[in-house]
Image: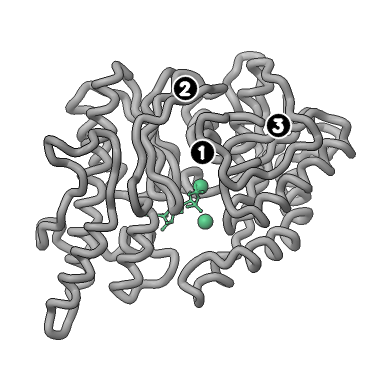
Amino acid sequence: TIVLGIETSCDETGVGIVRMPDSGVPELLANEIASSVEEHARFGGVVPEVASRAHLQAMVPAVHRALTTAGLTGRDVDAVAVTAGPGLAGALLVGVAAAKAYAAAWDVPLYGVNHLAAHVAVDTVQHGPLPPALALLVSGGHSSILAVPDLAGPVTPLGSTIDDAAGEAFDKVARLLGLPFPGGPWIDKAAREGDRNAIRFPRGLTGPRDAKHDFSFSGLKTAVARYVESLDGDVPVADVAASFQEAVTDVLTLKAVRAAQEFGMDTVLLGGGVAANSRLREMAEERCTAAGLTLRVPRPGLCTDNGAMVAALGAHLVHTGAQPSDLGIPANSSMPVTDVLV
Ligand code: ATP
Ligand code: MG
Ligand code: FE
């Protein structure tokens, strides 16, 4: 079975193609990405209208490139999957409309899937079928701990951020430090030259009476802002970046490992753009190993938004015999994480 997946929830136009054999071990054939990130950089954040227009321009060429890379034509595609939500309404709409058009033209089933479930599913194209796992999803818009007994759903949300998402904190702190947007990769890079123990920043919601599986990053962001303001002159960018990154990864890995132990899961899975962070990957590996847990984390290029993740989830749904979506499905900007498929 060949599944083509389309992702347009934010500023990446992603088209991925996955082959799913009867064995259930998916194979990634193509993963084309066009990003409008440069157009948003001067605004310091994603501008929804600009993203929608960029998706419109990039969509058809991206599908053609993906088919060419995979050595296929539209006639070879057996199913189309698309991110139906959550995300920016106008951006989602472009992908959903395109997916419906391709599904109708090729006369194949359509699967409207959840973006967050797709961030989890993408790991299967690198590491094979996923056992029941505790997923830590950290991106620009989300920070959640989910119990995922099976990719086809339903997932159980155990906790999430009560204010900023982890990626949002990276982007805001980068801005404070004068680093470009999106800031996550820049903090990661700057931190390599810094001392992660230089400044002790607060670890939100880690007290004995705090919500065990929830996160809070706005206090940390404020602490970094205060620290920077308190300096008379030169900001030690590398030390601040490393110390901030250490505080975020400390909390994320502590809570993920603790939740896995509490809910009896042997596998921890990282997903979402922040899972591309080198220190998070390193600390997660250390702490999972120490706790006797197996860590699964896709390569950085599969952590940030892409089409392969949507194709991977679509392929799993086809493989497990899920009911395809209606051609009339809407884009749902606030699609709940518990809904894997519409
Ligand atoms: P979602 O709807 O899933 O929240 P998103 O638009 O946030 O999607 P993603 O590509 O999943 O898109 O995540 C982007 C976020 O990941 C940004 O906040 C970015 O700064 C952050 N990020 C990317 N690479 C790194 C990194 N190496 N270290 C830390 N953060 C990173
Ligand atoms: Mg993005
Ligand atoms: Fe995402």
Question: Which of the two discs, 1 and 3, labels the residue nearer the N terminus?
Answer: 3
Query: Which quadrant is home to the C terminus?
Result: top right
Report the residue at 44% width, 44% height from top: 272
Query: What residue is pinned by disc 2?
Result: 130
- Seen from the viewer's position, the closer of residues 164 and 126 is 164
Q: Is residue 16 left or right of residue 237?
A: right
Give left or right: position of 341 versus 66: left
The residue shown at (33%, 29%) is 295
Q: Give the alpha-carbon distance from disc 1 to disc 2, as whole Å.
A: 15 Å
Please tell me how crowded label 2 is: few (under 14), some (14-19), or many (20+) other residues with Cα within 10 Å: some
What is the residue that sits farthest to the front in this orientation? 209
Residue under numbered circle 1: 116
Callout 1 secondary element: helix
Is the CB–ligand 1 distance for label 1 below 8 Å?
Answer: yes
Q: Specify the label residue 38 is tagged with.
A: none
Query: What crowding class fits label 1: few (fewer than 14 Cα within 10 Å), some (14-19), or many (20 or more)?
Result: many
Checking the image for residue 111, the label placed there is 3
Q: Position of residue 242 (x, y in %)?
A: 21, 59
> In what element is the residue under mark 3?
strand
Query: In the figure, is residue 315 to the left or right of 275?
Result: right
